[in-house]
């Protein structure tokens, strides 16, 4: 499986001799030639499909389409939003109940992580598993967002949501305009940068836990702003990889069930961007 976001490894649809470029034409029928994993799929379209633009080639039954991806993504994101709202309303974050709510949030995010790892190692997507991940992730986001809104600044959550939507729209527009070229070099650079970023964040957390304070200072002050911006840029890059995966899946006639993996990846990436936005705006507000 090929990784397309900073947390999970997922199947890739393109095998362009290791090059994930834009101009590799999908092939239909005939013997597999090593460039298209769905080359023997009789429903594979004859021409490439640009993500979110232009008519799609006629798809046979059981073949992934853009509509499938949009529907599944709406379901997973809707589950995240629903459980986030419910946890915001039902789990109070006043001083008397803050510890309990924090405990539930930590438990939820740990369960979400375990579910995500199970899905990452499964050969096929499991919709129930993906939706369960989204539900527990929503509980975590709801509590954290409520705490930030209560103890940092009331407008920070709205700013983070709007910022996340702006990044998604901007990357989608740039991808459709072909301003972003998702090549093997691009993917390798993003993956290396993401691994380095996450290792630094883990080191900062460990120093914070055992040494107290802000650890290495990567999540507060000027460095916090810098690393917040870097995290958002990385999230934007992973969105481009997600769009490429969707485009290849549609163009190469991937099975319809793969749309769940695409939705899963997009949800994970958007959650990543939202969390970075939330932290960045918290720092900018003067409280981190």
Image (cartoon, grey):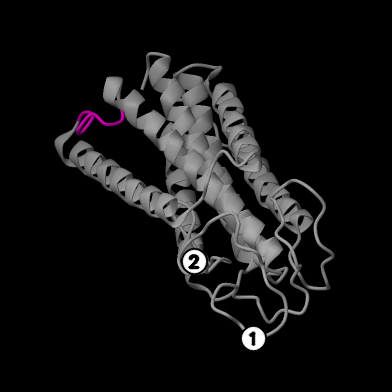
Q: Nearer the viewer, residue 174 or 2?
A: 174
Label 1 environment density (alpha carbons within 10 Å; few <14, some 14–19, many ≥20): few
Horizontally, residue 93 falls left or right of residue 250, namely left
Q: What count of labels does the image hold?
A: 2
Q: What residue is shown with label 1?
A: 31
In the rendered view, tell whether residue 276 sits above or below residue 120. above
Upstream in sequence: badge 1 or badge 2: 1
- Dominant SS type (magenta): loop
In the rendering, which numbered label is found on residue 120? 2
Horizontally, residue 197 falls left or right of residue 256, namely left
Residue 136 is at least partly visible in this image: no
**Residue at the farthest top position:** 286
Label 2 environment density (alpha carbons within 10 Å; few <14, some 14–19, many ≥20): some
Horizontally, residue 247 falls left or right of residue 121, namely right
In the picture, residue 184 is in which quadrant? bottom left
Asked if residue 218 lies in the magenta stretch, the reply is yes
Residue 236 is at least partly visible in this image: yes
* Range shown magenta: 213-219
Q: Which residue is depicted at the point 66% across and 77% down?
A: 39
**Residue at the farthest bottom position:** 31
Q: Which residue is depicted at the point 78% across and 73% down?
A: 62
């Amino acid at each position: 499986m090929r990784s397309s976001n900073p947390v999970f490894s997922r199947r890739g649809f393109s095998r362009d001799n290791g090059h994930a470029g834009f101009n590799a034409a999908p092939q239909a029928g005939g013997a597999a030639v090593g460039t298209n994993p769905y080359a023997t799929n009789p429903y594979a379209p004859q021409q490439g499909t640009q993500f979110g633009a232009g008519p799609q080639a006629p798809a046979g039954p059981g073949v992934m389409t853009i509509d499938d991806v949009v529907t599944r993504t709406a379901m997973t994101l809707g589950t995240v939003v629903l459980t986030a709202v419910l946890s915001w309303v039902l789990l109070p974050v006043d001083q008397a109940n803050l510890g309990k709510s924090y405990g539930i949030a930590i438990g939820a995010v740990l369960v979400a992580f375990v579910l995500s790892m199970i899905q990452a190692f499964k050969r096929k997507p499991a919709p129930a598993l993906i939706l369960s991940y989204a539900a527990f992730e929503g509980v975590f986001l709801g509590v954290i967002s409520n705490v930030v809104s209560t103890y940092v600044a009331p407008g920070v959550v709205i700013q983070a949501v709007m910022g996340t939507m702006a990044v998604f729209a901007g990357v989608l527009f740039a991808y459709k305009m072909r301003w972003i070229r998702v090549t093997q070099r691009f993917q390798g650079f993003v993956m290396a940068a993401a691994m380095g970023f996450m290792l630094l964040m883990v080191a900062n957390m460990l120093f914070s836990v055992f040494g107290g304070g802000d650890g290495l200072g990567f999540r507060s002050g000027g460095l916090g702003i810098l690393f917040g911006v870097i995290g958002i840029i990385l999230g934007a890059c992973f969105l481009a990889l997600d769009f490429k995966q969707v485009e290849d899946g549609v163009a190469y006639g991937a099975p319809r069930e793969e749309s769940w993996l695409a939705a899963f990846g997009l949800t994970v990436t958007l959650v990543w961007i939202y969390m970075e936005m939330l932290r960045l705006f918290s720092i900018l507000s003067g409280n981190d």
